[in-house]
Image (spheres, grey):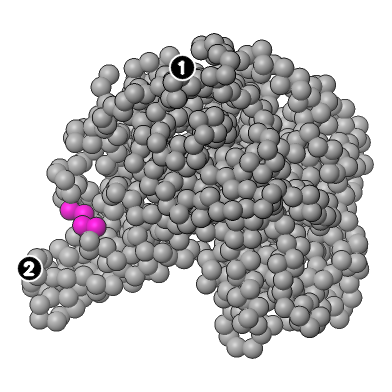
Amino acid sequence: MSLHSRDTVPERSGRLSRRSFVGYVLGGAGLVVAADLALGAGPAQAKGLPIPSLPQIPEIYDLNDFLTHCTLPTSGLIAIHIDERGDAHFALPRMEVGQGITTSTAMLIADELDLPLDRVHVTLAPARPELLFNQLTGGSNTTISTYTPIRVAAAVARKALLDAAAIQLGALVSTLVTKRGVISDLLGNTLSYGDAAALAASPETREVKVRLKPVADRTIVGTPQRRLDALDAVTGRKRFAMDLDIPGALPTMVCRAPDLNGTAKEVRNQAAVEAMPGVTHVAIIPTGVAVRARTFGQCIDAVRALDVAWNAGTVPGRSADDILRELRRAELPLAVPKLGATTVEGDFVFHFRSGSALEPNCAVADVRDGSATIWGGLKSPIDAQSKVAKALKLPQKAVTVNVVQGGGSFGRKLFSDAAIEAAHASRAFGAPVKLMWHRADEPRQGRVHPMATSRVRATILLGSVATFEQRHTSVSTDFTHGLGERLTAEVAALPTGLANLGFSETIFTLTQEVPYDFGVVTQLLNESNLDFDRFNTSSVRNIYSPDVRCANELIVDQLAKKLKEDPVEFRLRHLKSPVVKRVLRRAAELGEWGRAMPAGTAQGIAIHKEYKGATAVLVEIDCRPGTVGRKVRDAVTGPRVTKATVVIDCGLAVNPLGVQAQMMGGFSDGMAQALSYGNHLVDGHFLEASWDNSAYTRQWNAPLEFHCEVMDGDSTEPGGVGEAGVAASMAAVACAYARATGTMPTEFPVNFRAPLHFEPKPFVPSVPESPTNGLDHVS
Amino acid sequence: MPKHTFQLNGETVTVDVEDDVRILWVLRDVLGVTGPKYGCGINVCKACTSHINGKAFNPCSVPIDAIGADDEITTIEGLADTVPGDGLHPMQEAWLEHDVAQCGYCQPGQIMAAVALVHRVRQEGRAITEDDLDAIRNVCRCGTYSRIRQAIKAGAEAM
């Protein structure tokens, strides 16, 4: 099939000309306007073919094009309501987990409506099955896919207000101006948005044609804005799922098996646990034994007291090296033979790492006869609704799913595990539950980034890179959170050759790209098995990109070394995209690439191209013994990244301050994935059970200097930023580590084989006791 | 059930709850004070950091019967009232100024830890150092560590 270009978007998408769109004033009391969520959703146009490397798929049609394409068949409208005070209200069909989309969405509406930012109120929409595939928050796609429809809805609202004001003021619409929520005519008569909204209500739904504001007329979009929910966050008023006061929903926790994914056979002391202080219910559910009590503390006590007979888990007796052997067996061969001195190659291992956010998995569920209501931080609420309905054997429409802001996600909340568990528990108990995972459950039984290997082989012929091959082999990734259904449904829409690939291969093919002219380039994914139920996998702020790019960039440094070229010059000479070259040049300049560094310290630089943009990261790392050996109680210290410089071009940056925040977070993730953050599979279960076990970035690891520059891109469309900082950060840290130590790391995190820095907590009971000596540590 | 009385954000409160229930759950599940967050329950992640008699502590690791009627607990909800005026605490203002929060889940604990750190180094008659900042154990899974450091320095100046 041919690809749709931007100028041939089907008529039904409502686009009339370059800046004209169709929206609706909805019939009824008050002013409610709407736009089609599929507006402006045109997959990218094929660009000119770079020579000599043939274009890879993501250069023509990438995952974001696919996700955006999925919105095309959507019939659901998104609505903005203007209230009697003239404030705008919008329920965003995406999930805020810290990435700043409620703020950036409010900015788009405020600018298009000429309304002060604090008068735009963005909430999260509940599950809306009529939106079909258009309510999934992932792939850094939110702003890319909602940028146009949200502006169109706001423009329709402004036009409806102007039309009503023109009648009231007896003036021509063309003579009216809007500013900060007030409409004025040439004589100085004014009408507030609130008064105009009352007059603008329409008895029936009518179609309206609007034009969007030219970029030059904007005053908010593109300017740095602080988060609109920051005041709530710093005062403790921000409400997460476990902070909601749902009548009768008592704290509930699950006692889990010692083995990964083990199940409960029998509870031997149910009556005794039910008689414990505060405990109201105990019941076996598919994932363990659920307990409900007056306080979570009493749930913890009850979980610890339970005597349970367990069935084996899904990887009994297996350890990381067993899984590594499976991966090795599944590795696809490299096509170009090894040619002695002309070959540069690397063989990399990436271990499991936990995807848990700081807010543990949690959800509130109230299951009654014939219906269920769920509250939770859910990035795939329609999928959650469907899975809860299936678990309870209810029709999907009998399940209401309310989306609550999440305390982080990093891909984790694409899955609705806690919502499904809460539904099971509420049904078993016949009572509402507020179900939360214990921290120990998170790294041990929660979603993990799939373990993978990446083999890279490049060949140099006559001073040029002639071939560059990569074979990425991974434990199967679970894509059953709704994206899988999208792929099934949209299979005909995929470019030729993709339709017959599995989900994982499709995602890999749509996202991975070697952005260099390296002659014959091939990148292939294979999976060690097709059983995604064995491990609970997910993205951990990216699926393939950080590992693939890390392997790539380490080899790029090796190629530069072999050709005796400066790594930045070598990259600039081979990069295809001017956008990538620009961010690389800027990062090298800002981070003072090439400055003299003491022995044992070094710079590292890397690039990444994805999400309609590009990132370059330059770091300085200190691997000297005094630094590596510094002691912090119960912590991984190790090499210290002393300075990080991140440069991103994400096209139009709706909120540059928010983009910088995402780069800072992405850097913390990428650095941890390179140096310290892994999950150890030993004898059928993961050892980590606390934040002091899982060595995610902490203050003692944070760079002493961090700088991020958001470049003005040439593109007038926004790119994605949520995951955009991770891959180049992981790669740059790995490259710096290689240079500082003189050894290219081949296993990640680099400390994986070091002696454990913690004593693993027991597996039975499944959660540790809360200490009682907190007052000994006041400070 | 035993009754326990203590001072919470400037008010005397009395709760009916078993002696060994940790203060975090007394605050969250019994009293509905949800600013302090659960992140681990074992005094590691520090998301629940609050103050007892002006010093940082982690209520997930203190049973309710370990405190007395005169002990003053301050959670993020009561922080602003510990300084004169109707506005926020200077550390909260610094947090807004530097746009620190992303998801916001750890931020109440981060702010309470920061305020206690400033008080502590003042009592020691010195300024905050990079080593002091390195020693903060509060986890931020969004990775806002650099902005936290900037905000603490700015908040300390304004305190």
> Closer to the camera, A620 or A699?
A620
Position in image of residue A114 (x %, y %): 27, 67
Q: Main secondary structure of the magenta part?
A: loop
Q: What mark, if any, has residue A539 been given in the picture?
A: none
Q: In which quarter of the image is residue A734?
A: top right
Res A481 visible: no
Q: Report the amino acid beneath label 1.
A: Leu
> Closer to the camera, A462 or A402?
A462
Q: What stretch is highlighted in magenta?
A: A211-215
Q: In which quarter of the image is residue A196?
A: bottom left
Q: In which quarter of the image is the C terminus of chain A?
A: bottom right
Residue highlighted by disc 1: A501
Position in image of residue A326 (x %, y %): 69, 16
Chain of the residue under label 1: A
Q: In which quarter of the image is the N terminus of chain A?
A: top left
> Closer to the camera, B1 or B48?
B48
At x 63% / y 81%, what residue is drawn? B157
Judged from the image, the secondary structure of the residue bearing numbered disc 1 is loop
Position in image of residue A79 (x %, y %): 33, 52
